[in-house]
Image (cartoon, rainbow, N blue to C red):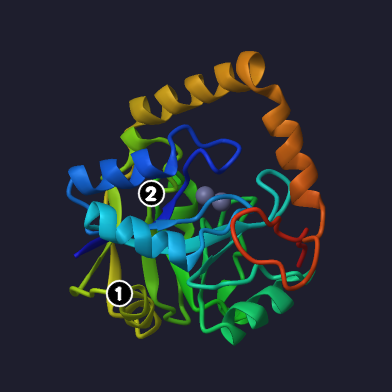
Amino acid sequence: MRIDFHVHTSRSPDGLHSLRETVKHAKRIGLDGIAITDHARLLSRREARSLTREFGILVIPGIEGGHMALDRHWIALAIDIIPATVGIAGVLAHIAGEGGLSIAPHPHSCTGYNNYARLGFDAVEAFNGTDRLSNSMIRNTAGLPETGGSDAHATYMLGYTWTEMERCATVEEAVEMVRRGRCRPAGTLIPAHKKMQFYGRAFVRYTTGRPQLMWKSMQSSFAAPPNAAATGEECNAALLDE
Ligand SMILES: [Zn+2]
Ligand SMILES: [Zn+2]
């Protein structure tokens, strides 16, 4: 089965299409599962279950943490509370404590953790649909489970990159399968013209339509969550550094 473990929607400041459009499109093009990993915004398990039922595709709740441009990123899947701590060690401990799965996305980019094994990530994104350079530098000598994710920020960027794995019916099964390394990255990079289509649209959106979005995202990414027990989609991720 094909699961894309790294997808953004318009719930990310830089995503173009809505959550529902994204899930619907993923199903239509033949993906079997999709992890929603918006920047600093957690999809709740309840929402994910509801989308799974409605669209007939496994929707895995998640978040991509770290400021979009200024921090290194981490992905957490299947958690209920956004880590409130500062520092990647605390974040990973929080994710483990919740029984969630941590993935180091695009680890060899300037916004990635290239020391993912030593830090204790559960898995590494060995193939990112957008970041050719990071992919080329992957060695994974520690043998962490490897995932593939598109890092799509628009529906038309989906379907090129995914993770191949045995069939699973629930979020818990999918997470467990990755944890055991029963998965491998598959597919190709997102074609350059699709990426250019996105960057063009995103640029126009920021410069003419909704510039306040970028400012809002900058602010929210720097702020700590309103309280440590905050849950759900409206919370902000903590500022992280190593
Ligand atoms: Zn990222
Ligand atoms: Zn991303």
Q: In this rendering, is residue 112 above or below 94? A: above
For label 2, the crowd category at 10 Å Cα-Cα, with few meaning under 14, some 14 to 19 and many 20 or more, is many
In the rendered structure, which disc, 2 or 1, sits on the residue that comes first in sequence? 2
Under mark 1, the amino acid is Thr
Query: In the shown orientation, is residue 188 left or right of residue 154?
Result: left
The residue at 35%/38% (across/down) is: 21
The x, y position of residue 45, in whole percent, is 46, 67
Instruction: Tell me the SS state at disc 2.
Output: loop
Q: Quadrant of the C terminus?
A: bottom right
Query: Percent from the top left, x then y, of residue 166?
Result: 19, 75
Q: CA distance from mark 2 to mark 1?
A: 21 Å
Q: Amino acid at mark 2?
A: Ser
Residue 23 vertical placement versus 241 (above, below): above
Dot 1 alpha-carbon crowd within 10 angstroms: few under 14, some 14 to 19, many 20 or more = some
Pick out the residue farthest to the top: 208
- Can residue 223 be seen here? The reply is yes
Horizontal side of residue 117 vs 4, given as left or right: right
Residue 52 image position (x, y, % from top left): 30, 60
Circle on res. 170: 1
Which element type, helix, strand or loop, lies under badge 1? loop
Residue depicted at x 30% and y 56%: 162
Residue hosting label 2 = 150
Say which quarter of the image contains residue 214.
Answer: top right
